[in-house]
Image: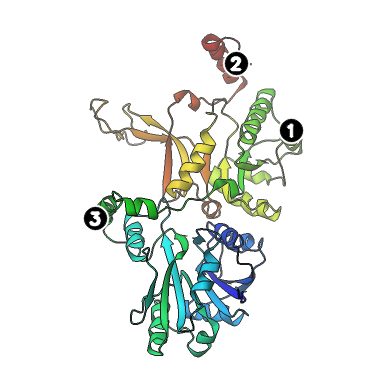
Amino acid sequence: MSTPLVSIIIRSKNEERWIKHCLEAVYEQTYKNFEVILVDNLSTDGTLQKAAKFPVKIVNLEKYLPGHSLNFGIEHSKGEILVFLSGHCIPVNNTWLGNLVTALADDKIAGVYGRQLPMSFTAAQDKRDLLITFGLDEKIQKKDSFFHNANSAIKRSVWERIPFDNKVTNIEDRIWASEVLKQGYFLKYTPDAAVYHHHGIHHGGNESRAASTLEVMEQFTFVKNEASHGRISPEKMEIVALIPVKGEKLEAYQELLLQKTIEYAKSFSLIKKVVVLTESDAIKKIAVKHGALVPFLRDHSLSKEYIDLSMLYEKCLPLLEAAGIHPDLLVSLEPTYLVRPPQLISEMILELLNCGYDSIVPAFLEYNATWKSENNERVDDGEIPRSKKPPLHVTDKGLGMVVYPELVRHGQLYGQHLGRFIMKNRFSKVEIQSADDLANFKNLMTMAHGDHK
C-alpha cells in the first residue's frame, strides 16, 4: 500500500483548551508518514506552548483570512496530500488519517471531507445540525459543492492548479469545491474519517426548537447507536492543584491544615502536580516536606488585602509556565477546610469536562430569607413554602474549584459558562480560621464520633 507524505495543516487562534487534545489524537494515528504545520494567528494564550510539546512546525500569520491561512500553511509544507483540521477538532480514532488518505485514491477525486460529531456538551442546535449534515453513507459529489475544511483532505496536485481564494472572509472551502467541480473533478464524503467538533457548523439558531428536534432524533436507535458524543479524557490532562498560602510563617494549626490539604490533593490520581503558592522560604520547606512543589516564591505584594484569588492566580500562572508547568486544568484548594468529600475534585473535573463548563465550583442550596446589607434589598423570592421556593446557589470556591487556565490568564475564575456542583454535606462549609476554630472542630468531632484523629 502506498503511503505518501501527508501534510496536516492546523489553523489556530487561542486554542489553548483544545490544541493538546487535537495533537494527541493526531500523533496516535496508525498512518505515520505525516508532518504537522500549525498556522497560528497571533495566539495570546498558551496555544503555542502546548503545541511546542509536539514535533510540529509552527508558522505565524498576522492577518487572518481563511483561504490565505491555508495557502500559507501549504507553502510551508511538503506533502503530496494536504489535510486540514481545525485546532479545536479531535480525531475520533487512530484510523482517521489513513481513512482520509484511502478516500483520495481515485484520480477523479480532488478532495474528501469527513464526519463531524458533537461533544457531550455541544449546544442542541449545533448537535442537531452535525447529526443531520454528516451522515453514515459515503457519497461522491459531482455537482454539490458542499465541503468542510474543519476535517478534510485534498491533493497537492489539484491545489497547485486551484489554490484557495486568498481574499474571501469565509466559505473558502465551498468556493474551492465549486471551482474543482467546474474542472471536472469529484468530491467525496467519508463517514470513516470522523472528528469531534464541539461547536458545530452554523453557530446559533433557535435553541428550544433545536432541543425539541434533537430529543425526537435521539429516541431512534439509529441516532443512539451512531452519534456517539465526544468526551475529553481527564487521564491525559495535566491537572495541577494550587494551594495559596499567605504570610511568612505558619502557626501549628495552619501547618496541620496545609499538610491535610496537600494530602487531600495528592489523593486524586487525576491531579498530576500539587503546587503551593507562597512568598516564604520557611513555608516552602514545610510544603516540600509534605510532598508539594514550590517552583517559585510569589511576590510579597500579592499578599496585600486588595489582592483576590483571581488576581493572585493571574500573576502566578506565567511563573508556573516559566517553571515548565503547563496546566490543562487548575484545581484551587484553600487550606482552611478539613471536611472535603473524598471524591469532590474528581467528580467536579468530570462534570466540567462532560458539560463544557469554563469552571466549576461547589454550591450549597440556600432557602432562608436573604438580604443585601447595603440597601436592605431582599435576594430570595420571599415567603414561599420551601417545597415551592427556588433555592439560591451559594458557592464556595475556597472548598475547591476547577478552572481552565485561559480564564485565569485574563484575571477570571468563573467565566460565562459556570458549573455549580451541588453539595449535599453542608458540614463541608466549615472553615478553620484560628487555633480556637480547630479546637472547637475537634470537640465537635469528638462529640459526634468519638476521638478525632
Work out whether 277 lies above or below 27: above
Q: Position of residue 123 (x, y in %)?
A: 36, 55
- Give whichever of discs 3 and 1 has the lower sequence position: 3
Which mark lies nearer to you, 3 or 2? 3
Quadrant position of residue 271: top right
- The kind of residue tagged 2 is Ala
- SS assignment at label 2: helix
The answer to whether one can see residue 199 in this image is yes
Q: Quadrant of the C terminus?
A: top right
Up the image or down, 420 lies above or below 141; here it is above
- Closer to us: 43 or 300: 43
Seen at 58% across and 29% down, the residue is 336
- The residue that disc 3 covers is 209
Looking at the picture, tell me which residue is in the foreground, 340 or 202.
Answer: 202
Classify the position of the N terminus by image quarter: bottom right
* Mark 2 neighbour class, 10 Å CA radius: few under 14, some 14 to 19, many 20 or more: few
